[in-house]
Image: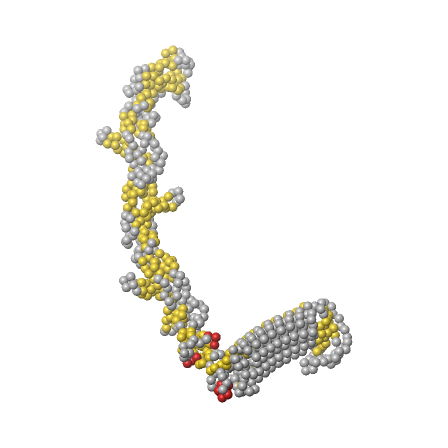
Amino acid sequence: MRKKIIYGFIFLMALVGMISINQANVLALTYTNEDGSYEYYYIESRTRVSIHKYSGTKEKVTIPSKIENLPVGTIVSAFQGNKTVKEVILPSTVTMITDNTFYGCSNLISVKLSDSLESIGISAFQNCTALKEIKIPETVKIIKDNAFMGCSSLQKVNIPANLTQFGISVFKNCIALKEISFSGKISEVPESTFSGCSSLTKIILGNNIEKIGNMAFANCENLTETVFPTKLKYIESRAFYNCKSMSEMYLPDMIEKIGSNESNISDTIPVSTDIYLKSGTVLAKKFDGYGIKYYPKQDISKLTVKLNTEYSYTGSKIEPVYNITDTQGKVLEKAHLISSFSGNDSVGTGTITITGKNKYYGTVKREFTINPAKVASLKLSRQESTALGFSWGAVKDISGYRIMLKNSATGKFEIIREVTSNSVVFASLKPGTVYTYKIAAYKKIGTKIYVGAESDEFVINTLPDAPGNPVFKSSTTGTVELQWKAPSAKVKGYEVYRYNSGTKQYDKIAAVTGTSFKDTGLAAGTKYAYKIRAYIQLNGKTYYSSYTEKTDAVTLPAAVKGLKQAEDSTSTTVRIKWDILNGVSGYEVYKYNASSKTYKLANTRKSSSVHSWTNSYLTPNTEYMYKVRAYVTLNGINYYGSFSNVVKTSTATKIPVVNLTQSKSTQVKVSWDKVEGATGYVVYYKTSPEAEWKALTQSTYNNTTYTKSYLNKGQKYYFSVKAVKLYNGIKLKSGMTSKSITLK
């Protein structure tokens, strides 16, 4: 920013009574910034600056708040006749816009006034034909004559509430202005204030207005509504001249005079305007005396009021619907009635006050009841065989809720409980039973109780109670049979569930109507787990009881197969073996007792994988019979499968007695006694005690000698013989006795 001071002589004019000028200053000063140059001088003993001329070509001008470090306080005709500027921003230091400051600024569109502004001078904005809107700060107290006269584009403007002085013709010929509220502290609408405002349709006059001046609204051809204050006393001549669109005029009770000729008001109010006036007032009596036509206002306190007196609280203020009808049954227009309310924002008793305006006067009061809102959104929260719980949407501004139950005998609802929360639980109910409830909110105020509308019927039912825990009754290798007791209340049927070890869940396998069930097609010797639940059907829906406790069951094992004698049986032992049955707990081995001619338990094998047994301390060359069955243990009880086929066995023969002789220097002759039952013999030898036996030959039953040749002199040799018995296709070998010989 740069500044330049130019000294020159000026004559100070048109400021008398407005600005306190420092008489020592007679020189015009110039201040220049980026927006242009300003001529100014000091005022009020050099405490402030007054700008009286702007020289520049900017369309947007921001007036500086300080010059020479002094605040800019006044604008004096600075922009008069400027055709370039479109927007002006005044600093907050400006308190006064003097006469003609923006006069004739035909391209001025926007002006931001100072928020400290107190006064707008004569013709300050006159003929600013492009200005569409202006916001006058509430600090403004004075608006002088013609201030906005001829602002033909002005559509929106406000009248400050602190206004104390208002000149004539301020908005004259503002042909675009459509509506305005004329408030402030002034008591008069001055002469020609809105004269020629041809687009003006509505004017609201402030409560302090007592007088409407001459020609105030003359030629407002589209004015249809004027809201008069109650204090209005005088309407001067031609105030509403040529307001030909104003079909009705509602005059306040205090008005005393219209126009200069009390016997003829046609030059002030168009003859086509219907005038409404309260009978008996000063003006009404004058009209009656001069025969001037008017329509008496109706007293609504003497008319019929129809009001809906019952409402439900919504959380918002309740404004009752009403109608007032006159003596001919005609409904009064609501536009001419004012409604106010008390006690209408909560549950209780509210009051509506209806006051007449325009065509009517008087006041009526009526009471109405605001009950709690209707309970809604009921939801089931607990459903058991003997208990039900449910909740609902909370209702505002209440004391509690009444729970009502439908009496199945009478069909009527009876109050059974009152609660303060929006949920309830009922216990000790009958299983599998339908219950129908209603709920209503209530509020207690003093001794009066306000009850809201009842909820819709809420029909719910308890679940059936569970049947008795199923009992494992019997089984076969492929079936399990269960049985249980029916629940106390009648049910439609039962669902049977079996545990699935793969999914680790219970799968539904059947639905039955009786209290027993046989599960078929099962694997033999396998444990199973079951649960049961009962169900009922109501209104097309199925409801289930809780599950019973788990019940274990087991199928019987299959018959043992593959039972046979093992070849490693000896002279005093018989070993039997059989095929493995997976999943069983073990096996029982039974041995035939010849004396009692029965099979008796000989051994228990307590593992499914131990599938053989050796019977010891037996007699050589003797037959024995065995059979085997598998078992599964469940809850300490063994469940047995069928016996296997009987297997006949035999022990091997006695051990042969062996003799050794040296027949030649390199030969040894082995001989033995013939053994009963033997079908042959096997000769063995070895050269040391630690060495393994080597079979030399297998001889027939009749051959009891064997010669071993090509031996070494001085060597010690060991020999033995086993008797062989062929039994049921198995070679049974006896034990053996070892003898040694050293060749000489």
Q: Is residue 75 visible?
A: no
Q: Residue furthest front?
A: 272
In this rendering, position of residue 696 left or right of residue 650:
right
Q: Is residue 24 visible?
A: yes
In this figure, which colouring scheme has been used for the structure?
A: secondary structure
Where does residue 606 sit, x and y in percent of width and height? 33, 36
Up/down of 204 relative to 430, above or below:
below
In this rendering, position of residue 303 left or right of residue 410:
right
Q: Residue furthest bottom?
A: 289
Give the residue at x 32% y 66%.
415
Q: Residue furthest left?
A: 596
In this view, the residue in front, 48 or 342, is: 342
Up/down of 235 relative to 380, above or below:
below
In this view, the residue in front, 497 or 410, is: 410
Where does residue 122 sit, x and y in percent of width and height? 65, 79
Give the residue at x 31% y 29%.
615
Which of the 4 image quarters holds residue 363? bottom left
Where does residue 74 sit, x and y in percent of width and height? 68, 76
Please give the count of numbered marks on the rendered protein. Answer: 0
Q: In which quadrant will I find the C terminus?
A: top left
In this rendering, position of residue 133 left or right of residue 695:
right
Q: In which quadrant will I find the N terminus?
A: bottom right
Where does residue 393 sit, x and y in percent of width and height? 41, 62
Give the residue at x 73% y 80%.
12
